[in-house]
Image: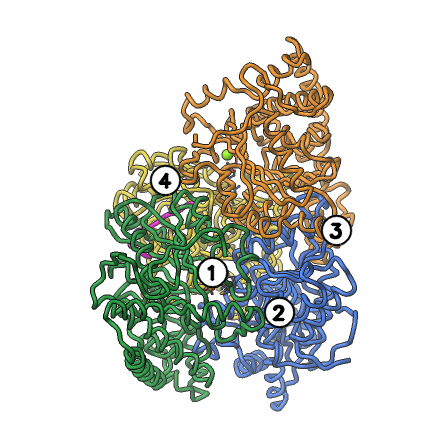
Chain colours: A green, B orange, C blue, D yellow
Amino acid sequence: MTATQPISVIEESGAINGHAHGLSKQELSHCYRTMLLVRAFDDTCLKLQRSGRIGFSIPNKGVEACQVGAASALRKSDWIFPSYRDFGMALYHGVKPLDMMHNMYGNAQDSAKGRQMPVHFSFDAPIHFVSISSPIGTHIPQAVGAAYAAMMRKEDTVFLTSFGDGGTSSLGFHSGMNFAGVWKAPVVFLCQNNGYAISCPTEEQTASDGYAIKAKAYGMPGVVVDGNDLLAVRKVVGEAVERARKGGGPTLVEARTFRMGGHSTSDDPTRYVPKELVEYWAKRDPIERFERFLAQAGYWKKGDRDRLYDECMQEVGAAARAAEETARPALETVFTDVYADMPAHLRRQGQAAFDLAARKGDASAGDGKFPL
Amino acid sequence: MTATQPISVIEESGAINGHAHGLSKQELSHCYRTMLLVRAFDDTCLKLQRSGRIGFSIPNKGVEACQVGAASALRKSDWIFPSYRDFGMALYHGVKPLDMMHNMYGNAQDSAKGRQMPVHFSFDAPIHFVSISSPIGTHIPQAVGAAYAAMMRKEDTVFLTSFGDGGTSSLGFHSGMNFAGVWKAPVVFLCQNNGYAISCPTEEQTASDGYAIKAKAYGMPGVVVDGNDLLAVRKVVGEAVERARKGGGPTLVEARTFRMGGHSTSDDPTRYVPKELVEYWAKRDPIERFERFLAQAGYWKKGDRDRLYDECMQEVGAAARAAEETARPALETVFTDVYADMPAHLRRQGQAAFDLAARKGDASAGDGKFPL
Amino acid sequence: MATLTLLQAVNDGLKTAMRRDPSVYVFGEDVGPKGGVFLATEGLTKEFGKNRCFDTPLSEDGIVGAAIGMALNGLKPVCEIQFQDFIFPAFDQIVSEAAKFRYRSGGQYTCPMVIRTPYGGGIRGGLYHSQSGEAYFCHTPGLKVVIPSTPHDAKGLLLASIADPDPVLFLEPKALYRSVKGEVPEGDYSVPLSTLRTVREGERVTVFCYGAMVPQAVKAAEQAAAKGIECLIVDLRTLYPLDEEGVLEAAKRTGRVVVVHEAPRFCGYGAEISAMIAENIIEYMEAPVARVTGFDTPFPNTLEHHYMPDDRRILDAIEHVHGF
Amino acid sequence: MATLTLLQAVNDGLKTAMRRDPSVYVFGEDVGPKGGVFLATEGLTKEFGKNRCFDTPLSEDGIVGAAIGMALNGLKPVCEIQFQDFIFPAFDQIVSEAAKFRYRSGGQYTCPMVIRTPYGGGIRGGLYHSQSGEAYFCHTPGLKVVIPSTPHDAKGLLLASIADPDPVLFLEPKALYRSVKGEVPEGDYSVPLSTLRTVREGERVTVFCYGAMVPQAVKAAEQAAAKGIECLIVDLRTLYPLDEEGVLEAAKRTGRVVVVHEAPRFCGYGAEISAMIAENIIEYMEAPVARVTGFDTPFPNTLEHHYMPDDRRILDAIEHVHGF
Ligand SMILES: Cc1ncc(C[n+]2csc(CCOP(=O)(O)OP(=O)(O)O)c2C)c(N)n1
Ligand SMILES: Cc1ncc(C[n+]2csc(CCOP(=O)(O)OP(=O)(O)O)c2C)c(N)n1
Ligand SMILES: [Mg+2]
Ligand SMILES: [Mg+2]
């Protein structure tokens, strides 16, 4: 793609040539299982969408190592300002598939109360996985502001913000990177370069030699990593996280990877992605790569994948069924959380909506009285 | 300031060590005279502002070589997308001080019809000096779009866009540079790094090693030039212009200079600029530097400065008097040029304004009838 | 005449414009080989080449900023913002620059350009794929704001917008992209800007609406008619500059007015219609203008059908003003 | 009590907030050592150090984006946008993010923050140092919009805004910065948001106004009183969410209403006041609401005195509704 060679750790064969990853068997297994869980979630959502049970989803196949590797470098007290494709980071840190499925269905148990599109998650525990919005790049300077707050309180929290190759063209990238550079803020900027912004390929996105080099414009280090290599991502992001934690300031990490599916379930990538490119990357599946490493380490044997994937599918499937059976949000949720206290005009509008729903016999109106 | 050494041509002594500037005596004299004209315009505006005759002006002392050197590399058929401090570029290409003074007074002869603040010039001849607006950086992607139009028509026009060090933080810088890189557009980006954005010094503006390096984020060359050295600016911008003209794409030029006055006549720089910095730069006046070169070349002798500056002051003074005597814009100019054709609601609002002005006996209302 | 969807009519309008005028350029995110996320630009790159229909980097500021530059220098840019919800990074370019260039330069520099963008709810798009921001732009002198509601108007208004000497924001009701069909003349024609369209005649109540609210208003009017209340339905279609005379005429005819939009009520477009009518023709009015609008909340997802005005809410308002 | 200008009252409010709450941070362009281009933040860096009052790079998007992040993580950011005209690069952060965080996260993440910015005409600032953009923000659910017109309110409303759990846009009428003076309590106090201020009692005509239009309305009311028309003047001071009950009460008391603002008329704030009154209390009204506003043009420079509503135009409107 460009002149710069990405850092990698796991070779084709699975060998890691003495790389000291410092991870216990348990940690490695958790990474592995999370990647499978991401894939199971993905596969399930795709089916749910195709069968009309949910409206939309964001394929994740191919980018599991980026997300899980990066997330694994964080503590629970750190914050993630994610993009819509990053739910693997939440899963790694213990967010339950059921909580995610509530969001995919936009039901009454959804932490966003059914207000957002699917995959626009918001979790404040077990890790801060900050509410995702659709506009590209807006979360980047927000991560920097949050980091400034931590610096002021002399906390050693690190802030990871993740975005795509397309995201580097946004204003938020420019302002966020610039502010972080000036403030030496403890932020890791993770650019998941998956080759496309919807249909726009890298050469139409920027003339720069890859994305990591953009760090130079903001006086911070930029590193390119093989995004399909979990240990390499873990290593590079981990180093950036530790530098940030110690007051060494921000880093831009470019993880080179590829989105094997469409941009979203509304997208048909065959309109713009050359077949050869898909074939090229199909051979570089991040899960298989990690399996070869695990096998060499004596932690994996044939059959593990199927068994674990099945387990994950069970869990995700059960979550989907539970989410599907959960009621819609109550009508009042249209009017709450606009402000901390509901202003009078919203109370009036809410009452009118309840009156109408009651006349129509709409269940979401409850007993037809605005309860607030 | 940073590690990168700016390119310079004229030494302290005035020597140019065999540099082939390729300029005739007449061209050199025009550059010299234009710098004096800029200074005369500046000095005059400062006085006019201090005595309450105009409301505002933008000091230019110290940055004359940047503007004139850069402008001298352009043809009349090229376009300038300037910032508010760039009127030296217009003067170089033959815009008359009188036309500029009409703007400073916002009178009926002002090409902007008295609608803009002073120094927000707009000229479409003898060169395209595109209407200046106040928001920082918005003109940068516009220059790129205009360049795209020229490319499509296979014209060899070059587009110079100029902005300050602060301007590099704007969204327009990011989007404009990025688009130009991808399109290989014939644009020269001139960053006049005068050390401050109003009161904000470089180290609080960006953590990058100067500004030219930001070019790397957009896949184009970046060059640092001594902005107080007219021949160096001419050389570096000239090379960028010629590269652009031949289809070689855009360049970012950082000209290092210093604004000797306040940001504007409303600003008191002693609140934030260290005295030593002013002293340092006072010794590096661009006009004196150029004079030493001219003297060595045998084109200048003591006395020339005073004579020429006087001439310029005469011309500018006469322009100021003429502009002051020119009437205010007619009331109708509040309502025209919102659209090509005036919509009915503006006609009604205009008529009401005329009626009121007539009742008040306000002269700008003419005979009290809305004439359009 | 062909029968087209609104989306196909937009596509046809773009092709017609590009055929008749070589200075028309189309660009935006994913508008090239992919043909746009809604396929409004399908086939353009193929027919006109990748210089005239192309993808841009992900920057609305860059898209509109570059469009302005092209317009200043003789092209006719027709750029796309993928969803109106994503126009805000370009707000500065639109409001500070495109809208003000003619004025601030005394007419020396102008921005004849079109910004197309799908707007509005009804596709379960939640907060950021559903918004109706027309009021922001109608409060911005120097801009024109156009919203078609039929395939015929979509093409005709688009062609008029592209021919217009001033910057036009062309808002396309995405809920109608594929749900309405209609006859569309082949080749070049235009529907003049700042003209109204009478959708339905009636003498009891006037309903002003636009975009995706037009079919809802028609449904409501049918139900009202069944109750003996005949409604005059007016599609505003150019919101700014508005044919104010026409609006006042239509209001006068019945003396009872309902105005409908999806956007939040507070400081929404309906307020202007109401204020304008009160100021100018209060003596003809039998009832205060009733507004049927989105709520003053962000746009929800699962419950969007409660948020968006529908025939039922419009009918309630018609009955309210009728019985006033 | 000290007698302060409005500008000094803002400065005093900031200092009071920073003294009472160590989580209050002030930043923006030139707000540090220079003290802001209007000197509203003078002395803050000195008293509170450069961590708590500091300059930022020239990026409004960055300023507001970072403020949101700080607010999400426990600080109380009070950022400055140098002129309201330059807020548009931050429009996306304000409209898409600050305003919607609480809603879209189901209350998990919130943005208690204040954006201060000088707005309005009267200083010969031309197109880009004069605008009044309040209507854009009042059409954006999730935001609060506050405009003081006296030193007392400037400090009290600012302190209330900083204490508020939601994002507040605090618009300061720059024309009044140094031209009005008044008594300002020392130390901490607050003027609750979403409350009105009765500026002057009167029974014939109600005038709604805010910011720099308040003194103009008072002047007009004095002239009207000389003609026997006593005006009730109401300073709205929190534009959004508005005390609608209070507005309707004040309108009912006279049955005749004038609303005044500097911003363009079309889709301006006055339209909402007019529409709201018509909808709710038409039966009390003796005349349609009259709007006195800026024109539907960009803001001019030399002729700004024609553009801006003054006592004369307000008086005309008072007489118009009075004689209706
Ligand atoms: C400001 C803005 N413009 C446009 C869009 C529409 N959009 C959604 S995703 C996307 C592409 C993002 O590409 P990239 O940043 O590479 O992330 P990826 O999806 O490849 O992970 C676009 C254009 C948006 N969400 N926000
Ligand atoms: C978007 C925007 N924000 C803020 C301002 C206010 N402002 C005017 S000039 C200026 C500083 C510009 O500094 P720089 O780009 O270095 O140019 P210089 O004046 O030094 O030539 C600022 C902040 C503005 N005009 N536009
Ligand atoms: Mg991508
Ligand atoms: Mg500068």
**Residue C2's image quarter?**
bottom right
Region of the chain picked out in magenta, as a range: D72-80
Mark 4 falls on what kind of element? strand
> Distance from label 1 to label 3 (Cα)?
34 Å
Pointer 2 with pointer 1, Cβ within 8 A: no
> Distance from label 4 to label 2 (Cα)?
47 Å
> Distance from label 4 to label 3 (Cα)?
48 Å
Q: Which residue in the structure is indicated by mark 2?
A: C35
Pointer 4 with pointer 3, Cβ within 8 A: no
Mark 3 falls on what kind of element? loop
Cβ at disc 1 under 8 Å from ligand 1? yes
Q: Is residue B114 left or right of residue B266?
A: right
Q: Nearer the viewer, residue D180 or D33?
A: D33
Q: Chain of mark 3?
A: B
Q: Chain of mark 2?
A: C
Q: Chain of mark 4?
A: D
Q: Is residue A230 above or below residue B127?
A: below
Q: Which residue in the structure is indicated by mark 3?
A: B153
Q: Nearer the viewer, residue B59 or B15?
A: B15
> Distance from label 1 to label 4 (Cα)?
28 Å
Q: Nearer the viewer, residue C98 or C46?
A: C46
Mark 2 falls on what kind of element? loop
Confirm whether residue D126 shows in the render: yes
Q: Amino acid at mark 4?
A: Phe
Using a 10 Å C-alpha cutoff, classify the residue at mark 3 as few (fewer than 14 neighbours), some (14 to 19) or many (20 or more). few
Q: Which residue in the structure is indicated by mark 1?
A: A136
Q: Are marks 4 and 3 on the same chain?
A: no
Mark identifier at residue D54: 4
Q: Is residue D47 left or right of residue A279?
A: left
Pointer 1 with pointer 3, Cβ within 8 A: no
